[in-house]
């Protein structure tokens, strides 16, 4: 929904020298205090983990039981045998299959497009000189603090004018706008792309386009990966704009979940099965790339 | 910095650059292109940014002065400030404004306090800390829709797990849907669950940038761990805290998915008891088809955000100055 960036955090202001290209460093307790934690720390953290994980567990439990099970008074806390049956029912009643495919198309295109647009613009802002650079960058960064939700009415009128309501491009194209992404890539390239490298390439007669593809992109790749993951998660989970621009005929997963929850289906286990299906892909991404996502959040902070 | 110099010098040095005898024109052409080409790099982003980002934001103010209906959004009829006066005489506007405020406080304050505590613990040397950090961020990966549906289930009145546990302890079940305070707590808890881990990581990043020597100095002065936390960690973390407060305030002002999906009702409960401004805007625009009125609400939200963010920044600056003056 919203993408916002942290102001350059203290280390960047303090001394850029101790702040290596973002990517790996953060997990290993850089400058901070490194006292050993006692058993109480483990206890409290364990409890916090339990609370963050429990709703996921509960979704699995509820999704694998029957509606009658859900209404029993000592509630059952273990998974049941109905998972597949409930999945089948969701596919039948809410066409989650189509919704999943739509979400994949939307999030995939947004991710590729955003990463590309933002890397191009981030490179220009970081390393090229042109008139109005400062003003344009300020404009971009300045709007990061304004939630896009506030511009949603004219955006809808625009989409309606173009007759895009209920079509996936209505969600994809506005999704490519990421002021945060531009800012993030700029910061990344300012830090990790030495000016000398570009100058050397220029002396060798390389054009800017050539420099972009064969020098900037390889160096920017880790940053692009982090931005891509964050963009994918945000796009997959976006709720506000898709329910306005799309409908039940052409839903993304989040729109379909809304129909499930809005009395479209009355079976609690089926609703939970749908929720599970809608969450699985992003959990998969998170499971594979969790470390990098944590690193990305700690560097630059995105809010979705 | 010396980039332009190189750019100009480049074509003039014949070594390796373009072949061809009429170098003059080619070089001039290339020079022009080199001046113009940065705009080509920002063009894709800025085209989209202007069309889908900046223009809608600005145009909202304009739309809010017109009568625009959803079905005929092409026709606009001048109304002046009538959308605003209609808003200010609607009791549900005031209800939603109040709800936005209480839910905002109920969700933001505990969320940031807990995040601070967790970050402090995460900053210790721990076994499996990467795992803990990742696991604590897991709720952030879920969507509003999924999280809300699960919590609505947990908060169910008759068969919800939370009421069951409350019953085990010996209390009466709470009506999480129709009770005003109860429903607002329930909605806030979804926000808290999703965002605490995220904020904890932001704090952790801030803590790791506090110079180690400060702690050593404090320790030599005999400061306890608690005093170190109050006198070293908190001041060092101030910019980060201000940032999270601002971000959470903005998030709370536009809260929408949680109250919409908590029961699936567009009015935020039977008596609008947990309807937020965001949901009220949606109800006016896409429930009652009054896009002009909805734009007025969006503009009110914008002013609210500017005021709140401004107040935050002001307080932060004044406190920082007081601190410096001591």
Image (cartoon, coloured by chain):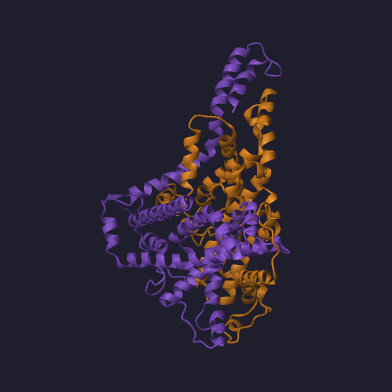
Q: Residue at x 43, y 60 (%)?
A: B253
Position in image of residue B128 (x %, y %)? 73, 63
- Circle count: 0
| Along the line of sight, the residue nearer the viewer: B3 or B187 | B3
Vertical placement of residue A274 versus A252, above or below: below
Vertical placement of residue B309 versus B1, above or below: below
Identity of the residue furthest to the bottom in this view: B170
Identity of the residue furthest to the top in this view: B21
Identity of the residue furthest to the front in this view: B221
Vertical placement of residue B182 versus A20, above or below: below
Q: Is residue B235 left or right of residue B127?
A: left
Quadrant in which the C terminus of chain A appears: bottom right
Position in image of residue B25 (x %, y %)? 58, 14
Vertical placement of residue A142 versus B30, above or below: below
Q: Residue at x 61, y 56 (%)?
A: B207
Q: Is residue A304 visible to us here? A: no
Q: Residue at x 69, y 39 (%)?
A: A219
Position in image of residue B219 (x %, y %)? 64, 59
Q: Is residue B260 visible to us here? A: yes
Q: Residue at x 67, y 30 (%)?
A: A196
Q: Quadrant of residue B161?
A: bottom right
| Along the line of sight, the residue nearer the viewer: A159 or B99 | B99
Position in image of residue B106 (x %, y %)? 46, 68
Q: Is residue B37 left or right of residue A214?
A: left
| Along the line of sight, the residue nearer the viewer: B131 or B95 | B131
Task: Give me the chain that's orange.
Answer: A
Task: Give me the chain that's purple.
Answer: B
């Amino acid at each position: 929904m919203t993408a916002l960036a942290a102001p350059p955090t203290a280390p960047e202001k303090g001394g850029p020298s101790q702040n290596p290209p973002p990517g790996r460093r953060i997990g290993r307790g850089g400058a901070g205090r490194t006292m050993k934690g006692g058993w109480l720390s483990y206890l409290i953290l364990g409890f916090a983990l339990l609370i963050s994980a429990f709703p996921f567990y509960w979704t699995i439990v509820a999704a694998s039981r029957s509606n009658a099970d859900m209404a029993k008074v000592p509630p059952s806390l273990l998974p049941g045998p109905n998972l597949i049956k409930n999945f089948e029912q969701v596919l039948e009643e809410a066409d989650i299959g189509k919704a999943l495919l739509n979400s994949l198309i939307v999030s995939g295109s947004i991710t590729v497009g955003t990463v590309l647009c933002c890397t191009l613009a981030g490179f220009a802002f970081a390393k090229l000189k042109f008139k109005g650079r400062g003003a344009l960058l300020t404009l971009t960064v300045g709007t990061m603090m304004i939630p896009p939700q506030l511009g949603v009415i004219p955006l809808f009128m625009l989409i309606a004018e173009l007759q895009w309501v209920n079509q996936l491009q209505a969600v994809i194209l506005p999704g490519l706008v990421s002021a945060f992404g531009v800012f993030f890539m700029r910061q990344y390239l300012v830090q990790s792309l030495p000016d000398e490298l570009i100058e050397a390439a220029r002396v060798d007669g390389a054009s800017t386009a050539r420099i972009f593809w064969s020098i900037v992109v390889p160096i920017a790749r880790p940053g692009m990966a982090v931005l891509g993951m964050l963009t994918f998660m945000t796009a997959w989970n976006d709720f506000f704009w898709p329910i306005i621009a799309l409908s039940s005929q052409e839903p993304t997963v989040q729109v379909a979940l809304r129909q499930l929850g809005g009395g479209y289906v009355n079976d609690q286990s089926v609703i939970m099965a749908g929720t599970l299906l809608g969450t699985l892909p992003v959990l998969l991404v998170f499971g594979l790339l969790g470390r990098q996502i944590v690193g990305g959040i700690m560097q630059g902070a995105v809010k979705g | 910095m010396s980039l332009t110099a190189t750019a100009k010098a480049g074509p003039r040095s014949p070594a390796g650059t373009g072949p061809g005898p009429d170098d003059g024109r080619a070089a001039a052409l290339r020079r022009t292109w080199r001046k113009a080409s940065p705009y080509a790099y920002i063009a894709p982003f800025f085209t989209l940014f202007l069309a889908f980002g900046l223009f809608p934001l600005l145009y909202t103010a304009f739309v809010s002065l017109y009568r625009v209906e959803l079905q005929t959004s092409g026709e606009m009829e001048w109304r002046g400030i009538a959308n605003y006066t209609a808003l200010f005489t609607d009791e549900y506007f005031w209800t939603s404004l109040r709800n936005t405020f209480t839910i905002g406080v109920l969700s933001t304050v505990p969320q940031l306090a807990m995040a601070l505590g967790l970050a402090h613990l995460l900053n210790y040397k721990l076994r499996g800390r990467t795992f803990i950090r990742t696991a604590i961020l897991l709720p952030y990966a879920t969507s509003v829709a999924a999280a809300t549906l699960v919590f609505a289930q947990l908060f169910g009145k008759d068969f919800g797990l939370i009421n069951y546990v409350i019953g085990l302890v010996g209390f009466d079940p709470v009506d999480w849907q129709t009770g005003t305070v109860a429903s607002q707590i329930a909605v806030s808890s979804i926000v808290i669950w999703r965002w605490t881990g995220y904020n904890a990581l932001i704090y952790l990043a801030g803590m790791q940038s506090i110079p180690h020597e400060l702690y050593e100095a404090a320790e030599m002065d005999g400061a306890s761990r608690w005093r170190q936390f109050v006198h070293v960690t908190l001041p060092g973390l101030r910019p980060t805290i201000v940032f999270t407060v601002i971000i959470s305030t903005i998030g709370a002002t536009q809260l929408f998915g949680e109250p919409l999906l908590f029961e699936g009702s567009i009015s935020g409960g039977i008596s609008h008891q947990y309807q937020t401004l965001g949901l009220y805007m949606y109800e006016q625009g896409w429930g009652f088809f009054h896009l002009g009125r909805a734009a007025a609400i969006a503009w009110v939200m914008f002013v609210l955000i500017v005021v709140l963010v401004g107040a935050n920044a002001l307080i932060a600056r004044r406190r920082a100055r007081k601190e410096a003056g001591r």
